[in-house]
Every structure is written in structure tokens, then in C-alpha cells.
Amino acid sequence: MASSTVADGLRLRERLQVRARLVFDTAWRIGSGREGPTSDLGVLLDAAGRPLLPGSSLKGKLRSTCEALAPALGLRACLLNAAASGVFCASDVGWYKQQRSVYQSAVSQGIEAQWAWIEQNTCDVCKLFGSPVRAARLRFSDGLLEGGPLAPVQVRDGVVLDRDSHTAAAGLKYDYETVVAGTAFRITLDLENPTETDKALLGAALFEWAAGSSLGGFTSRGLGRFHLEEIRLWGVNLDDPQERIRYLTIPSPDEKLTDRGSWQAYFQPILDRAVP
């Protein structure tokens, strides 16, 4: 039987859900890795031919945002590279390989020792987003396209520059697809069993995204500027009897969670406490 510490860490105690509208202020592209119907570089489309905003892209962007903001919160971010960041973490595959025998020794001592090693050797960002030895607390859905069956895709021209002459290289013209500005998606993020640190990272990232950020390819050329709006925060605390009954008995995912009110008012005190 699992110890009380491990069992408590695995059971669902609390869930926060962020629902928001992500709006692209400029044209944007998330590449398919293949040619498009009329271009050299296509955009990612779903089975119906509509532009797709995958949850993996949202997760990667949110992770990089949290990594950039973590030092301002006094938190640790390994950047998946312990040598570069100076933060030792199991998510750095090279460092983890060097520590594998130590980890196996902890495993041999029992689940409590294994749990303690993972907790001690995972940075704050990786505790939120997951590592090779622990699951992520934060989960993403693909964005749901708004505004009709299709979003127009445009083709733009590009050239390869000669770094010496600072002119276009002969015969190396290409074109690429973009999706028009104004495209909007509904996105959902679920955070399970959040710590105060998790909430601080997520809250800081939401403030950053509400003010505006960039996502996708060719962002250095001006593509992919976006912002969040209509941010709503929902949740459940399973230690609260009323919320527990509501969560367990209402089948509709839109009704089983409780409105947490203003997201700014919820996260601001957490950030005030976190900032050193």
C-alpha cells in the first residue's frame, strides 16, 4: 500500500481551469512541415482544411514564457539545460543520465525516497510542465477556431539573403503560407493540484499574454502577435463538500466547475506574495 504522502500527492484535490479567447493581431503561421497546395511552406490544417492551433504549440509557448518570468518571481527554471542555467533538474537528459544511479538508489529505498528525490531534483517550471520522472500538472486543449468554417490563408514571398553582400541570393526565392490577422481561437488550460508556485507562474504568464506576445513561426518578421481576452477562471476544491458534490454529480463540463471570479483578483495576491 502506498504511503500517505505519496497517496496524497497522487489524488485529485483541486483543479483550476482557464478559459480564454486567443486573438491573433497579425498574420501568423504554424507550419505543417510540408508544402502547401500553392506554396513551398504550408500551414498546419485540420481534416476539414481549417487552420489548427495545437495544444503542443500553446504548451511550448507558455513554458518559454514561464521560463523567462521565473527569475523575476525568485523561482528556478532549468531551461532543459543544467549547464547553461546552473539549475540541476531531471528534465535535462544529460544531467539525468549522470544521476541515474543515484535515482535508482532512491528507488531501491522505497517510494518515499523516490518521491523525495524527484521533488528535490525538479525545477519549479518542470514541476508545472512535467519531466521524464513526473507527470505535468498543466494540461492543454487544441484551440477551437471561431468565426466560420474557414480562415483565409495567404501566400507570401520570401528570399534567402546573402550574408556577405546583404542582397537576395540568386535563384533562392521561396513562398510560404500565413493565416490572416484577426483569427481567434477558444483555448482551455487545466491545472491539477496546483501549488502556490504553480499558480504564481501561471498567473504571471496570463498577465503577460493578456498584454500581448507572439506565437508560431517567423515571429522575428512580425508574424504571430496575439493577445488573450475574455479570460475566465473556474475551479473545484474537492475538500469543499458542496464543490465536491457538484463536481461528481453534474455531467456537463461547463457546469461542474465553480466560477472563481476575476482572474486578475485571484492571481494578483499570489504574485504579490511570490515576488521577492
Image (tube, rainbow, N blue to C red):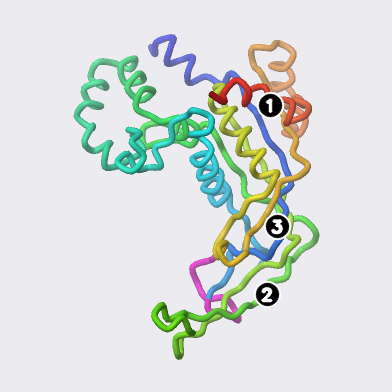
Report the mark closest to the observer, 1 or 2: 1
Query: As displayed, is residue 147 above or below residue 255?
Result: below
Compared to residue 131, the image places residue 170 above or below, namely below
Q: Quadrant of the N terminus?
A: top left
**Residue type, mark 1 in image:** Gln
Tell me which segment is drawn in magenta: 31-40
Residue occupied by mark 2: 154
Camera-nearest label, 3 or 1: 1
Residue located at (60% from left, 20% from top): 273
- Amino acid beneath label 2: Gln
Q: Which residue is mark 3?
A: 24
Residue 230 point in image, percent of width and height: 78, 42
Disc ID at residue 102 = none
Q: Residues within 10 Å of mark 3 (few under 14, many from 20)?
A: many
Say if the magenta span includes residue 36: yes
Q: Earlier in the sequence, mark 1 or mark 2?
A: 2
Q: Secondary structure at mark 1?
A: helix
- Marks 1,2: beta carbons within 8 A: no
**Relative side of 92 to 12, left or right:** left
Residue 240: x %, y % from top left: 69, 12
x, y (%) of residue 221? 58, 67
Apparent side of residue 194 relative to residue 225 in the rendered image (left or right): left
Residue placed at 75% from the left, 35% from the top?
A: 232
Q: Nearer the viewer, residue 253 or 270?
A: 270
User: Which residue is nearer to you in this view: 58 or 203?
Assistant: 203
In the image, 218: left or right of 18?
A: left
> Helix, strand or loop at disc 2?
strand
Quarter occupied by residue 189? top right
Q: Residue furthest bottom?
A: 170
Which residue is labeled 1 in the image? Answer: 268
Q: Is residue 193 visible?
A: no
